[in-house]
Image (tube, rainbow, N blue to C red):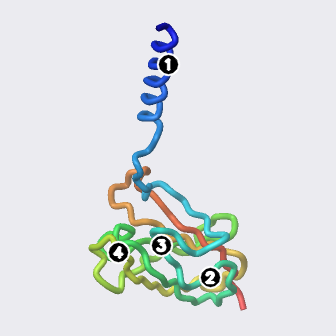
């Protein structure tokens, strides 16, 4: 009898632990920084140009598609930093179609970093109108600026 009670107790403890610590199948779409050293794809953002480690001129286009929730008022910030994280430029990427969807929406933005040459990062930030840190997310792509 004591063994049966102990087994039931263990089952209850395991079940309660499972209920407290197991996520219920919801994919996170906030607060994740995706470092795309291996791919320019994320379930929320697909970057067509530039590709990783691509050598680009000081004027280049960032294009691809992002889920509608990545935008706010049809845009999201694209930041260019040097390899040390110093900001060179931040500009809005514009949706090329209706952004009020959960589907992928094409975007494009022209970048001009002037006379900067060297390693850099293209960082696509989710537009977080709430300002709450738990809604921040970004995708980073390493590039080389120079000819």
- Mark 4 or mark 1: which comes first in sequence? 1
Furthest toward the top, the residue is 2
In the image, residue 29 lies at what x, y percent? 43, 58
Q: CA distance from mark 2 to mark 4?
A: 22 Å
The reply to whether dot 4 and dot 3 touch (C-beta < 8 Å) is: no
Pointer 2: residues within 10 angstroms few (<14), some, or many (20+)? some
Classify residue 77 by image quadrant. bottom left
Q: CA distance from mark 2 to mark 3?
A: 13 Å
Q: Nearer the viewer, mark 3 or mark 1?
A: 1
Q: Nearer the viewer, residue 105 or 110?
A: 105
- Mark 3 or mark 1: which comes first in sequence? 1
Q: Nearer the viewer, mark 1 or mark 2?
A: 1
* Residue behind mark 3: 45
* Residue behind mark 2: 51
> Residue at horizontal 46%, vertical 84%?
109
Q: Secondary structure at mark 3?
A: strand
The reply to whether dot 3 and dot 1 touch (C-beta < 8 Å) is: no
Mark number displayed over residue 7? 1
* Residue behind mark 4: 103
> Residue at horizontal 29%, vertical 73%?
101
């Amino acid at each position: 009898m004591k063994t049966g009670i102990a087994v039931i107790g263990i089952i209850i403890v395991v079940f309660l632990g499972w209920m407290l610590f197991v996520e219920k199948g919801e994919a996170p779409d906030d607060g994740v920084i995706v470092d795309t050293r291996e791919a320019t794809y994320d379930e929320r953002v697909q970057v067509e140009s530039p590709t990783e480690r691509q050598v680009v001129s000081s004027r280049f286009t960032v294009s691809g598609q992002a889920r509608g929730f990545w935008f706010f008022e049809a845009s999201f910030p694209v930041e260019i930093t040097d390899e040390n994280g110093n900001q060179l430029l931040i500009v809005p990427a514009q949706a090329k179609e209706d952004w009020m969807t959960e589907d992928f929406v094409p975007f494009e933005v022209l970048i001009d970093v002037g006379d900067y040459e060297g390693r850099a990062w293209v960082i696509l930030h989710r537009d977080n109108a709430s300002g709450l840190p738990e809604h921040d997310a970004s995708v980073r792509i390493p590039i080389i600026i120079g000819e």
